[in-house]
Image (cartoon, coloured by chain):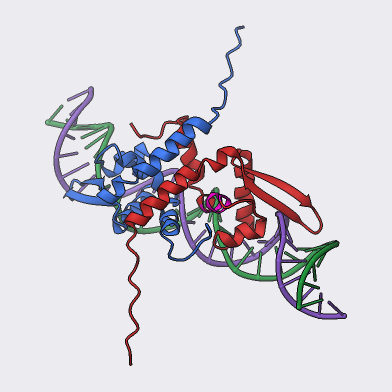
Chain colours: A blue, B red, C purple, D green
Amino acid sequence: MNEVQPSCPAVEAISFLQEKWVLYIVRTLLDGTKGFNEIRRNVGNCNPSTLSERLEMLESEGIVSKTVHSTMPPRTSYRLTCAGYELQTVVAAIDSWARVHWKPVPTPELEPA
Amino acid sequence: MNEVQPSCPAVEAISFLQEKWVLYIVRTLLDGTKGFNEIRRNVGNCNPSTLSERLEMLESEGIVSKTVHSTMPPRTSYRLTCAGYELQTVVAAIDSWARVHWKPVPTPELEPA
DNA sequence: AATAGTAGTATATATTCCATAGTAATTAAT
DNA sequence: ATTAATTACTATGGAATATATACTACTATT
C-alpha cells in the first residue's frame, strides 16, 4: 500500500519535506514573515548557499513567497503562502509526537565536592 | 518562538525525520513487518548502504525493531515499535496536506493522428 | 541443474553540503 | 564623525554524504 508510486501526492510531498532544513524553515516561518539571515539563525545556522537553494525551491513549489524591499542595501522578506501555512498540521503532529516520545538525555547532576 | 533550541523535542524529532529516506521507511512500515530488500523496493530503491545506516539509526532511536530469523541464508525483518507506529499521525498529516495541495502535473493528451 | 532471492558490506564515484570571504549601502554604537 | 555591524546573497574549494555496483553463501523455485 504505502509504496513509492511515482505520482502519489504523499510521495511527492515527502520528497521535498525531507530535504535538509525544509521542515525547520517551514516551522520558523509559522511564526511570521522573516528575512534571510533571520531564517538562517532561527533554523540553526544553515549555510547561505543551501538556504538560498531551499527557499527558491519552496517558492517554486508555492510554499513560500518572497518580497524584495530593496536591493542595496539588501532587504528581503519571506513568508508562507496559504498552502505553506497549512503545513502547520504536519509540524504540529511532529511536535506532539516528540513531546510524548522524546526521552531527553538525562542531564547528569553535578556532584557536590 | 519556533527557533532551533538545542533540546526542544520537535527540533530533535525533525533532525532525524528529515534524513533522507526516513519518512518513506516509516511510511512503508506502517503497512506491517518487512524485510530489508522489500523496504528497499517499496521505498523507491534506496541504496543498501544508506538503508542499512538509516535502519540502524531508527533502531537506536527506538522507532524500528529488527529481528534476525537466520543469518545464512539471510532472513531479517523490520517493524515499527509502538513509538514508531505513532508516527502515523505525521505521515497522515503529510498525506492529507498533499491531497489538498498537490497540483498534479497535467498529463498531456495524446493527439490523435 | 540453473536462476533468483535473501541481508547486507565494500569500494569507488557522484552528489550535496559546508565554511568562508566578499559585495554596497544603511544603521547603531562609540 | 568614525567605526562596526547588519542586510541578502553568490562564489569557491573542500568535506561529508549518497550512489551504483559487485560480492557473499545459502535456499527455494523452475
Where is residue B64 shown, x and y percent of the image? Answer: 62, 44
Position above or below: A60 against A42: below
Quarter containing the C terminus of chain A: top right
Position above or below: B60 against A105: below
- The quadrant in which residue A107 appears is top right
Q: What stretch is highlighted in magenta?
A: B24-30
Q: Is residue B18 visible?
A: yes
Where is residue A17 shown, x and y percent of the image? Answer: 42, 51
Outermost residue toward the bottom in this view: B113
Identify which residue, D21 or D26, lies in the foreground: D26
Q: In this view, does B20 lie to the left or right of A36?
A: right
Identify which residue, A40 or A9, lies in the foreground: A9
Where is residue C15 shown, x and y percent of the image? Answer: 49, 62
Identify which residue, D8 or B68, lies in the foreground: B68
Q: Is residue B29 covered in magenta?
A: yes
Please tell me which residue is depicted at 24% across the width and 51% down the height of the picture.
A65
Identify which residue, B78 or C14, lies in the foreground: B78
Q: Is residue A21 visible?
A: no
Where is residue A41 shown, x and y percent of the image? Answer: 35, 38
Please tell me which residue is depicted at 61% across the width and 38% down the height of the picture.
B62
Position above or below: A71 against D27: above
Q: In this view, does A107 lie to the left or right of A11?
A: right
Overall secondary structure of the magenta stretch?
A: helix
